[in-house]
Image (cartoon, rainbow, N blue to C red):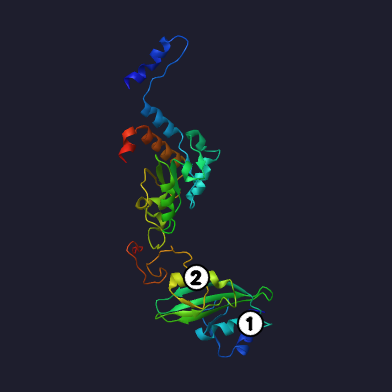
Amino acid sequence: MGLIKKVPVYTENIPGGALVATSLEQVLNFGRAKSLWYLLFGTACCAIELMCTGASRYDFDRLGMIYRATPRQADLILTAGTITKKMAPRLRKLYDQMAEPRYVIAMGGCTINGGPFYYDSYSVEKGIDHIIPVDIYIPGCPPRPESLMEGCIHLQEVIRKQKLSDWQEK
Amino acid sequence: MTRDELKAYIESNFVGRMTLLESGKVEPMYEIKADDLIEVATKLRDDLELKFDFLCNMGGVDTRERLEVIYNIASTSKLHRLDFKVILGYDSPAVESICPVWPGANWYEREMYELYGIDILNHNDLRPLLLPEDWDQGHPMRKDWDAPDFVRMPEL
């Protein structure tokens, strides 16, 4: 990091041009964190909050998050809504179709542990971490757009701290 | 036809085939024997005074003592409604498919078959409708149903 702090000093000394010195890791992580394209995957009322966050009042675009209608173009899957046992294999299939690096945000109580359907329900999966690995949990029923955005900013911070070797190990 | 006229008409035309039950609060509720179901239902539909041409709703009930299949029917031209039920025992419950009379019953019967385990005789397509395709944990709407990851609400 010492070199990065000195970069403005070096660029001032170069006449007629600018030079930026950084590491490949930081460039890649910056790109990944600032262009998190998420999969359009809404299965219940959380999707309404997700739509609201994507619309003009909260404006997901300013975090670099744009919805994608196909998992092959998405970096992030926001599980907005209840996942039933019938839906679980489909969710796994969507996750498997996404290209790495891929991230998962469990949005709302249903996806964390079944939420309001924990008791007396034969059809709701009790937590999507039985199906796919989860990076960030956002509690709420449903979470407000503010908490959804905070979760996404947390995920961006996690991505900024990643090492290149992390993905190779997996 | 008003409710009282309807009750009187059924009393005189369906002697011994439809038994009036006390449980009907809004609409009159009748009991029909399982082996007489299709004939009575056809007569209810084709009778020129009744003209019950619409099956509004249909479902199963588990009362812990017996299983019931409840049909709610209505007439779109005569503007009256009626409920009737078929009472079944727990050992091998089965009821005749009502699709020949009211074709809209098809999906209701599939749902009842998988959730209550009530066998539907002469139904053309009994694939699972709501449950997963590979479901092997029985009939979840039965009162005594249980599964490894099923959690009952604790008594408060």
Q: Quadrant of residue B56?
A: bottom right
Q: Quadrant of residue A121?
A: bottom left
Query: Which residue sits at x=58%, y=85%?
Result: B39
Residue A132 image point, x, y percent: 37, 49
Identify which amino acid the numbered label 2 is placed on: Arg
Q: Residues within 10 Å of mark 1 (few under 14, many from 20)?
A: some
Q: Residues within 10 Å of mark 2 (few under 14, many from 20)?
A: many
Residue receiving disc 1? B6
Q: Which callout, 2 or 1, points at the residue further toward the start of the chain?
A: 1
The residue closer to the viewer here, B34 or B97, is B97
Label 1: state its secondary structure. Answer: helix
Distance from disc 2 to disc 1, alpha carbons, whole Å, reads: 31 Å
Residue A144 image point, x, y percent: 46, 44
Residue A85 image point, x, y percent: 41, 58
Query: Is residue A107 something that shows in the picture?
Result: no
Query: Which residue sits at x=39%, y=55%?
Result: A114
Residue A97 image point, x, y percent: 43, 47
User: How many numbered circles does the render carry?
Assistant: 2
Subunit that carries the residue with mark 2? B
Of tags 2 and 1, which is closer to the observer? 2
Query: Which residue sits at x=41%, y=19%?
Result: A20
* Residue projecting furthest to the left: A169
Q: Is the residue under label 1 in contact with that under label 2 (CB below 8 Å)?
A: no
Q: Quadrant of the N terminus of chain A?
A: top left
Query: Is residue A16 something that shows in the picture?
Result: yes
Query: Which residue sits at x=43%, y=39%?
Result: A152
Q: Quadrant of the C terminus of chain A?
A: top left
The residue closer to the viewer here, B129 or A138, is B129
Identify which amino acid the numbered label 1 is placed on: Leu
Which disc, if any, is residue B110?
A: 2
Q: Against A53, is A163 above or below?
A: above
Label 2: state its secondary structure. Answer: helix
